[in-house]
Image: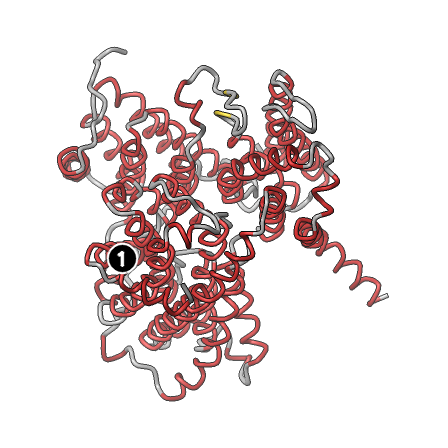
Amino acid sequence: MNALDGILFGFSVAFEWRNLLACFIGVLIGTVVGVLPGIGPVGAMALLLPATYALTPAGALIMLAGIYYGSMYGGSTTAILLKVPGEVSSVVTTLDGYEMAQRGRAGPALFVAAIGSFVAGTVGVVGLAFIGPLLSKVALTFGPPEYCALCLLGLMVLSRLTDSSLSRAFVMVAAGLALSTVGMEPMSGTSRFTFGFLKMSQGIDLVPIAMGMFGVAELLSMAERELKTQAPIRVRLRELLPTKEDWQRSWPPITRGSIMGFLFGLVPGPTAMIATFTSYALERKLSRHPEQFGKGAIEGVAGPEAANNGAAQGAFIPLLTLGIPFAPASAMLLTALLIHGVQTGPLMMVNNPEVFWGVVSSMYVGNFMLLVLNLPLIGVFVSLLRLPMYLIASVVALLCLVGTYAISNSMLDIWVLLISGVAAYLLRKLRFEPAILVLALALGPILERSFLQSLYLVQGEWMEIFQRPITAGMIITGLVVLAAPALLRQFRGSAAG
Amino acid sequence: MNSRTAGLAAAVLFLVIGSGQIYMSLALPRGTLAEPGPGVFPLLVGALMSASSIACLVLAIVERTPLEFGLLKDAARPAVLVVALAAFLVLLPRVGFILPSLLLQVVTLQVFGMRGVWRRLAVAAVITAAAVLLFETLLGVQFPAPTWSF
C-alpha cells in the first residue's frame, strides 16, 4: 500500500462513526486537560485507558492520540490568557501571547496559535504518511542488536535533552530500568525481585507509575504553590480575526515551526518543549523587529505554537514504525497497543494497517475538530478557567486513585501510584527528572530482551554487536550527543584562546 | 534540611538502592556471555545506578548552586494531602469507598482553600456521589467489599 492509498484507507477507518466519536472525545478531553492545570495529557491517557477496552485497537489509539495532540492546543489558551502555560511546551507562548492579550489582542494570538497548530498537524500527518512506511522498511532489516542500540541511543539522547545533569539523568535511567527488571525475565521466565507479591511477578505496570509521576506529583506541587483561580480575559468571536499584517508576519514562522517541530519530534525526549524554544530563538533572529519580541510579537506565538504541535505529531513515528516509545505519551500509547494485542514494530503497518493508517488519518480529522473547538468555542474552554482550583484538585485526586484502581481492581497499583507520586514530587525538587524514569521503565523490557537476544546471536562475542554498521552508527551518535556539550566548551575555549 | 543535605541524602539513597540491586542480582543465575542468565541485565543496571549515584554524591558535595525550591518550604499542604491519600488507601479495603472518598474530598478541598465546613462536606458528598454513579454504576468498577477489620 503506497502512502496515498494508505491515507485514503486510513480516512475510511477514521470516518467510521465509532472512530469519529473516539477522536472527538479524545481531542475534547485533550483540550480540557491542556486548559486546566493538574492531570496533564499522560495522566489523562492513563486514566482513560480502561475506557478504551470497549473500543477496537484503532479506536483506542485514535482516542488516546487525540488526548495528546489536543492538549497541545489547549495548553496555549491559558498561556495566552493567563500567562499560565497549561503544558510545558506552552511556556514560550506566554512571552508574547500574554503580552498580546494585555494589549487587547488576545483574539489574534489565539487565532494564530490555533491556525499554526493546524498547519503543523497537517505537515505532521503528511510526514507520518511518507516517512512512516520508509522507516518501517528500514526497520525490517533490524535485528536484536539494532533494537538494543536504538534503545540505548534513545536513553542517551534523552539524558542529554532534559534539565537534569548527566549523572542525575543516568540515575533516573537506571531507576526506570531497575523497575522494569521486576517480574519475569523475558528469556527464561525466572521470577525476580517480587518480594513475595504474586502480582509483581507480572512486572510493574507503567500506568500507575505514570499516573503517580504526572498526576499525583502535579497535585502535590499545586498544593504547595497554592494556585488561585484567576479571571481570564474575555474573548469575543469577532475579536479573533487577525489583521492582514498579522497574517503576513505569521505565515513564515508557522511554516518553519511546523517543519522544525516535526523533525524534533523524531528525536527522543521532551522535544515539543525544545522545539518551541528553538523556534522562538530562530524567529527572533530572523525577524526585522527583534526588539518587539517579549512585547507582543505575533511571530513569537506563531512559530512556537506550530513547533509544539509538529513535535507532538512527529513523536508518533518511532512508536508506529519501530514500536519504540521516545516520549512518556508514546509509552502510554504502546501500553494501550499491547493491551489490545497489537504487535508493535515495523510489521504493524502490514499486520494492522487499520491501526497505523487509521491513526495517521484520524490526526488530520482530529486537527480539524480542534480548529473548530478552539476558535468558535474558545469562550467555553476559557470559562473552564473560572472553576475554583479546589474543585479541580479534589476531582483530579479522586480520578487518579479510582482511575488507577479501575484498571485491574488492584490495591497494589494505587499504592504504587501514591509512592511514585510522592517520589516524583521530591525528585523534581532535587532536579531529578521523573519523565526519564517513566520512559526507561517503558523501554526496559525491549532493551533487556534485545540485549539478551543479541548476546545469544553473537554467541557471547559482544564486539560483533558493535561491528554491525547500523548498531555502530547509533552508539557513536549517542556518545557524540553525550559528549557534545563538553566538546563544544572545548571548541569555544580554543576559539577564544 | 538544606538543599545540599537533601542532594547528598538523595545520592546516598540511590547508591544504597543500586548496591541492593547488585547484591540481589548476584543471587540470580548469571550464565555465560553466550547464554546470559536472568541476573545479567539487573546487575548492569545496578552498576549503572551505583556509578551515577557516586557521581551525584560528588556533585552534591562540590555544587554550589542552590536547588530551585527549598525541600521543606511550604511542605505542610502537600504533606496533609499525602496523609489524606494514604488514609484513603488504608481505609478503602476496610470500610468501602464512600467514607474514605468523603474524607479525602473534605481534606483536599480544605488544602486548596475552600472555606466553610458545611460547604466542604456538601461538595465532598456531591463529588463522591458522582464518582459512585460514574465508576460503580456506569463503568462497573468493583470497589473492595468492606471488612470492617483494623
The residue sitting at 28% across, 37% down in the picture is A403
Which amino acid does the dot numbered 1 rest on? Answer: Cys
Instruction: Examine the rendered structure and indicate whether residue A425 appears above or below residue A81.
Output: above
* Quarter of the rendering occupied by the C terminus of chain B: top left
In the rendered image, which quarter is residue A151 located in? top right
The chain containing the residue under callout 1 comes to A
Q: Position of residue A235 (x, y in %)?
A: 26, 72
Query: For the N terminus of chain B, which image quadrant?
Result: top right
A145 lies left or right of A380: right
Q: Position of residue A352 (x, y in %)?
A: 37, 51
Q: Nearer the viewer, residue A271 or A457?
A: A457
| Residue at x 86% of width, y 65% of height | A497
- Can residue A218 be seen by looking at this rendering? no
**x, y (%) of residue A168?**
62, 41
Horizontal and vertical percent position of residue A324: 50, 47
Residue at x 64% of width, y 26% of height: B36
- Relative to A64, say whether A380 is above or below: below
- At x 74%, y 60%, the residue is A488
Q: Residue furthest right?
A: A497
Mark 1: give few (<14), some (14-19) or many (20+) Cα within 10 Å: many
Q: Is residue A493 left or right of residue B7?
A: right
* SS type, badge 1: helix
**Hey, which quadrant is residue A73 in on the image?**
bottom left
For this view, does A341 lie left or right of residue A280? Answer: left
Residue extending furthest toward the bottom? A244
Colour scheme shown: secondary structure
Front-lying residue, A464 or A489: A464
Residue for badge 1: A23
- Residue A308 falls left or right of residue A241: right
Q: Is residue A156 visible?
A: yes
